[in-house]
Amino acid sequence: MACDRKFPTRRLRRWTCLFATTLVGCLGLLLFTPASAQDMTACVTRDLALVNGRVHTMDAQNSIVSSVLIKAGRFAALDPDPLSFDDCTDVFDVHGRTVIPGLIDNHVHYIRIANRPGHDLRALEVTFTVEASLQAIREKAAIVPSGALITTIGGIRRTQWQERRFPTLEELDSAAPANPVYLSERGAGPGQANSTARDLLRGLGVPVTDSGEIAAGADTALAYDVLAADLTNEDRKRQLLDVADYALSVGLTTVMDMSGTVPGVGFIDQTNGYDFFLDLVREGSHKVRTRIYFPGLDEDEELTQLMGYLDNKWPNYGPEMAKIVGIGEWSVGRSLFNEQPLGDAARLAQRRIAERGWTYHQHIHTPEEIDAHLDVWEELNEEFDLAAMRWTPGHLSFITPELIDRAKAMGLGLGVHGQRYHAGGMGGPPWRTVIESGLVAVGAGSDGARINTLNPWCMIYYMVTGRDVSGELINDGQQISREQAVRLYASHEQGWFTKEDDLLGGIGVGRYADLAVLSADVFDPAAVPVEQIRHMTSVLTIVGGEVVHDAGAIER
């Protein structure tokens, strides 16, 4: 089926083809399946029931139920009558395990991980000794092809390991003798290579010491560029599916993706940089629910092009598993966003977004940045209902009670993100103050994985303890309970940010059937000591009523 010329951008044509092709295919199955074949099918669809659990719904009442019934990708009943199950219902008995809604990252650079070279190893994020990191590398080397590059670029810091150092070249050689290994702290370095990766990088023109060290800044940027230069879309697909498997294994079921157009590791070209992702959507092979934000740009020509996208109404465009929802994390490029007061380009871009009713999510950390943006937003709010459009200040490492009150007065929700877990230095979102402010919605996220960790349990640990990746207490007085921390990632409030109030987040009738059966009861300190929070996993993850991760711990 061809796309006609009434859709003016290449991206729009791709999305249109995707939905038209899917619709035609489904109709074809209905219209042309022989009656005899239909009669032979006992169950047109399979339902799913999860029973005998402790299911935290994360609804407004903090309800806990023991079972749920899922039909057609949505929760159909809470504590249903078991007699209502039939032969078309798959029943999972979780034997008292703790169940939570699927975790949702409110602000993450997820798709850009696919632009990293080699075979990404997110598992290093939750290793805290050198030996544990080497064991993770051994396990990765055992499953990737001999000679394949193994990388962790971003989401790690030397200080997370008890020894306060990278694994040495010799240690990496021993862990992966048949594979080059390259590690880079927070994406921008410094970096560490084993001997095979050292020689590879030197051959590509990157300065590397004899001991495999790569200096931070220009040298690590060059290392990334030369290693990623030959990536194909097949490489990107493989990488993103691997990352999706990791996300689902820790119960992360939805990402609000803030793109990757800020120059640096994982840059995504808006023209064709999402082609590989769209292929995965068409194939139905990518199982993490994705909500995409595109950033604004600096030049007049680029702003005009962006407005063309706006005028053609591509927000909320896509299937349930992959929607384009708005602008973020910039209204203009990074070079202009933090002028105080905001300059003409930023004001114009934000007005254009408001005129078109677009959702908008803005990266801001300091009181000065937040104040400058709220000045503009309060002016715009006199003409436009920014809350209805779900405009969201995000990050907010140093937001004050006064600034929270200004956002609350406009009816806005806040995205509070634990970037400081990896950033170092004192401070971090005032979790407790924000929660106690009575805002319409609050959602948490990581700002991973270029800088911060992707693993949501690291963020939950940070909220509960106030301690960063190195174990330093940096956010004392703003610690919150485990229940509050999980709610920030999993509750029904997360749906507010994408205009999916009745669908996304939490467990309730009619909502997306996304959940995680946990490896242990994270709400019980006796069962999960505080230092073990970061090691939480899911033994069974369900997205849209489909089992997408199964560790084999639960029998049907």
Image (cartoon, rainbow, N blue to C red):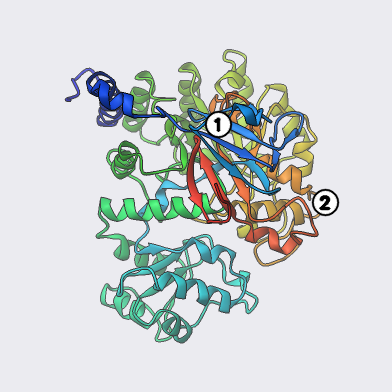
- Which percent across, then down, holds residue 437? 78, 32
- The picture quadrant where one finds residue 33 is top left
Question: Are the two marked residues, 1 and 2, in contact with CB atoms closer than 8 angstroms?
Answer: no
Frontmost residue, 97 versus 153: 97
Residue 430 seen in the figure:
no
Disc ID at residue 477: 2
How far apart are the two marked residues, 1 and 2, measured between alpha carbons?
A: 41 Å
Residue in view at x 34 percent, y 61 percent: 117
Q: For this view, does 158 lie left or right of residue 435?
A: left
Q: Which residue is mark 1?
A: 70
Amino acid type of the residue tagged 1 in the rendering:
Ile
Q: Is residue 215 above or below residue 260?
A: below
- The picture quadrant where one finds residue 501 is top right
Q: Nearer the viewer, mark 1 or mark 2?
A: 1
Frontmost residue, 506 versus 163: 506
Q: Is residue 55 above or below residue 386?
A: below
Disc ID at residue 499: none
Dot 2 alpha-carbon crowd within 10 angstroms: few under 14, some 14 to 19, many 20 or more: few
Q: For this view, does 500 lie left or right of residue 286?
A: right
Q: At numbered mark 2, what does the secondary structure look like: helix, strand or loop?
A: loop
- Which percent across, then down, holds residue 204? 27, 72
Residue 343 seen in the figure:
yes
Mark 1 or 2 closer to N-term?
1
Residue in view at x 17 percent, y 25 percent: 1
Amino acid type of the residue tagged 2 in the rendering:
Gly
Q: For this view, does 515 lie left or right of residue 325?
A: right
Q: At numbered mark 1, what does the secondary structure look like: helix, strand or loop?
A: strand
